[in-house]
Amino acid sequence: MRVGIIGLGLMGKAMARGLLDAGHGVYGFDLRPRACREAADLGVTVLRDARAVAEAAFPLVLSLMTSDDRRALLWGAQGVADVLSGGSIVIDTTTARPEDLVEDHGRLAEAGARLVDACVSGSSQAVLDRQALALVGDTEVNAAPYEPVLAAFTRARYYLGRSGEGSRAKLIVNTVFGLHRLVLAEALALARDGGFDLEVILDILRRGETYSKVMDRKGPKMIARAYAPAVARLEQHAKDVDLILEYAEGIGADVPVSRLHQELLARALARDAGPLDNAAIFEAYQ
């Protein structure tokens, strides 16, 4: 298949790598010249703009930050929606507001194109390792034309039926990811203030029933306070927690721990940790 990717950041490049390894042609674009150069080095055919990618490829995969980014891409200055033909499929992997996704799904449907939320559960490294999951707001039957694309960079696909359900499920999953990191950061900070050797404490946590993969991936970064290169940035998760709280409020769910998490993220962001790996939540305890 000739797959298009718009947004060639950490996740976009990781997905491109999986698609290339699976034998697909990949055409891409990013507003940032450096991201385009790095993608080209991987083997992505970088085109002049997003419209050119939409014209050259099927389906089109979006890897953006927010609903506003998607709307600007489709109906703003880049005008990608204008070049989508009837039957076009746009796979949006962005973690964004579910209600916006549903609205945009309806707007594209009026033009005969499909917008599908296929959120990726896992970091860019998990995508590279083929350990990520796809949470899809569609049925398995309707997904048949683009399932090989998702299969190229995820190990399992969950088809949740309605548009927007993939985005909502991603917020639930990201609640767990974020709180795992937060709990580890707090435990290590407690151990540090108690005068313990953090390497020893981390080894204890890894070997007992307290174990989770976050200890392998984030623990050493926290102990060393070394957060580069980023696998997933702290500022991205701060955005996700804002969305989690908004979702919870909309359905009447009580999430007091996530409210506290938002406060601690703000503390870490105030220490300029936003662009760093999300293990930098540990900076909230400095």
Image (cartoon, rainbow, N blue to C red):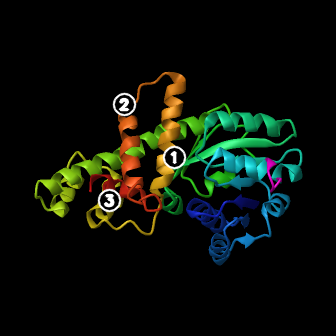
Q: Check disc 1 and report its element: helix, strand or loop.
A: helix
Local crowd size for mark 3, using a 10 Å CA cut-off: few (<14), some (14–19), many (≥20)? few
Q: Residue at x 45, y 69 (%)?
A: 229
Q: Residue at x 33, y 47 (%)?
A: 182
Above or below, 14 against 241 in this view is below
Q: Check disc 2 and report its element: helix, strand or loop.
A: helix
| Location of the N terminus (image quadrant) | bottom right
Distance (Cα) linking label 3 and label 1: 24 Å
Task: Residue 6: give x, y in percent of width and height.
Answer: 71, 59
Q: Amino acid at mark 2?
A: Pro
- Of tags 3 and 2, the one toward the viewer is 2
The residue identified by callout 1 is 239
| Location of the C terminus (image quadrant) | bottom left
* Mark 1 vs 2, N-terminal side: 1
Q: Amino acid at mark 1?
A: Lys
Q: Amino acid at mark 3?
A: Asp
Residue at the left extreme?
A: 195
Question: Is 125 displayed left or right of 259 in the figure?
Answer: right
Task: Residue 145: give x, y in percent of width and height.
Answer: 75, 47
Which numbered marker is on residue 216?
3
Q: Are marks 3 and 1 in contact (CB under 8 Å)?
A: no
The residue identified by callout 2 is 256
Local crowd size for mark 2, using a 10 Å CA cut-off: few (<14), some (14–19), many (≥20)? few
Q: State the extent of the magenta-drawn residues as a range.
A: 75-79
Task: Residue 104: give x, y in percent of width and height.
Answer: 74, 38
